Amino acid sequence: MTAPQDGTAVARRQRTDARRNRERLVEAAREAYAEAGPEASLNEIARRAGVGPGTLYRHFPTRTELLTAVLRNRIETLCTRAVTLQEAAAAAAVHTAADDALAEWLRAFLAHARVNQGLGGALMLEEPAALGIDCHQLILDAAAGMLTLAQRQGTARTDVSPADLLRLVTGIALSTARGDDLEEPDRLLGLVLDAVRRPDRRA
Amino acid sequence: MTAPQDGTAVARRQRTDARRNRERLVEAAREAYAEAGPEASLNEIARRAGVGPGTLYRHFPTRTELLTAVLRNRIETLCTRAVTLQEAAAAAAVHTAADDALAEWLRAFLAHARVNQGLGGALMLEEPAALGIDCHQLILDAAAGMLTLAQRQGTARTDVSPADLLRLVTGIALSTARGDDLEEPDRLLGLVLDAVRRPDRRA
DNA sequence: AGCCAAACGGAGAGTCTCTCCGTATCGTAC
DNA sequence: GTACGATACGGAGAGACTCTCCGTTTGGCT
């Protein structure tokens, strides 16, 4: 409300110790998630970061917000990559370029979701409340871009929505989260991609 | 170990009050799960059933076991249906019979998983430890039967395993568990079925 | 009717989430 | 350099949950 919006919002008027603690918390959360999955104890994360529980909750009122903060970097990387892939595919003369790009990006998305032990999936499943919404939207936009291009190039069926596609891939990440077969997710993604591809036969 | 195995195991030598309490617990759990999902409080379930927490834990040492007990009936029904569908499909002259049967059964499976707010999915994801394993196997066998038949009739690609198929459908149930779009799961299942179908093109 | 193995129930230990508020610290203005 | 107000911190603690232990009760058999 009263905060001045000076363009790029250089300094948020946040005290340096607050900023430092925030970073420590995110780092601690990343470690904890890596070890215990998205259900990691918030108390433990605070302890690890060397701050009190109160501090954690002041910075991240909900579990989702902390999750979002941890994933934001990765998500932004992922979406940046989508833009790159998309541009390359649009420029390429090969008619399967968009299809390949979509496949590659979804593979990256799946890896992302799995590396985080379903964190990404957990996030996608959360109510789009709070801050999670912009990450969700970011991914959705990236997927929409990739898919639309493939549809324009005629390699993807047009009755599939980006949201559907993400649901399927998220589902793969979730249902294989505890599995031990490392090749399974890729195999399943291949199946899904085949389903999206077919430009011919339609229901 | 010391228990006599008298054929069909008529009476387990279980006291009648124990048996009654067990049934009450399962019933209470079903209600609680319907309201609060698989994370429902075990204390609350015990209270609802009118027994102490200790009694609950004696009957069901782990959360999974209670879950399994609640689902077992439904799972058995589901698998029985698989057998029926399979026999009908095997007898039918139409060459898409097995395909239709598989589709119908997977639809039922998905509905089952969703009705239980991801209970089924949650169960599938659990470690196959404890008693959960036989339910898991039951479903896997049913899926294998349906799929094999479709493969024999040539309507399903042969490089898909029953486990893969179940993973995908389970994934749909999980990733749409919190969604509000009621048509989405069916749409996604349609996609997966299309992917499994194609007898032509192969990677 | 009486016995005892089986089963019960609930107190309570340990853990987790989340809040509240007295205290400490930062940044600034002088 | 110091003093002051806003900002942020930390941790005690309330409330809820999981799971255990053990004294008490009860069903089934003789």
Image: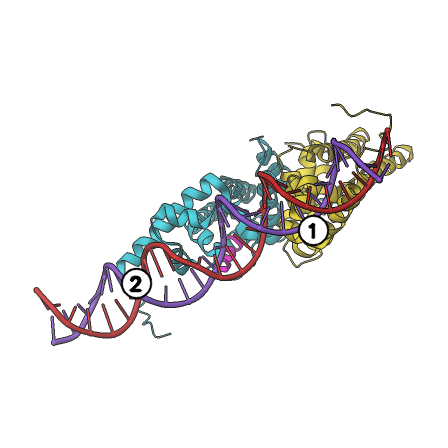
Chain colours: A cyan, B yellow, C purple, D red
Q: Is residue A3 toward the left or the right of residue B158 in the image?
A: left
Q: Is residue B148 toward the left or the right of residue C16 in the image?
A: right
**Location of residue A177 in the rendering, given as x and y in whole percent from the top left corner:** 57, 39
Q: Which residues are magenta?
A: A132-140
Question: Residue C25 sits in which quadrant?
Answer: bottom left
Task: Give me the chain letter of mark 1.
Answer: B
Q: Marks 2 and 1: which is nearer the front?
A: 2
Q: Is residue A85 something that shows in the picture?
A: yes
- Residue B145 vs C8, above or below: the answer is above
- At x 44%, y 53%, the residue is A66
**Location of residue B171 in the rendering, given as x and y in whole percent from the top left corner:** 64, 44
Q: Residues within 10 Å of mark 2 (few under 14, many from 20)?
A: few
**Mark 1 sits on what residue?**
B185
Q: Nearer the viewer, residue B187 or A25?
A: A25
**Location of residue B185 in the rendering, given as x and y in whole percent from the top left corner:** 69, 51
- The amino acid type found where label 1 is placed reads Pro
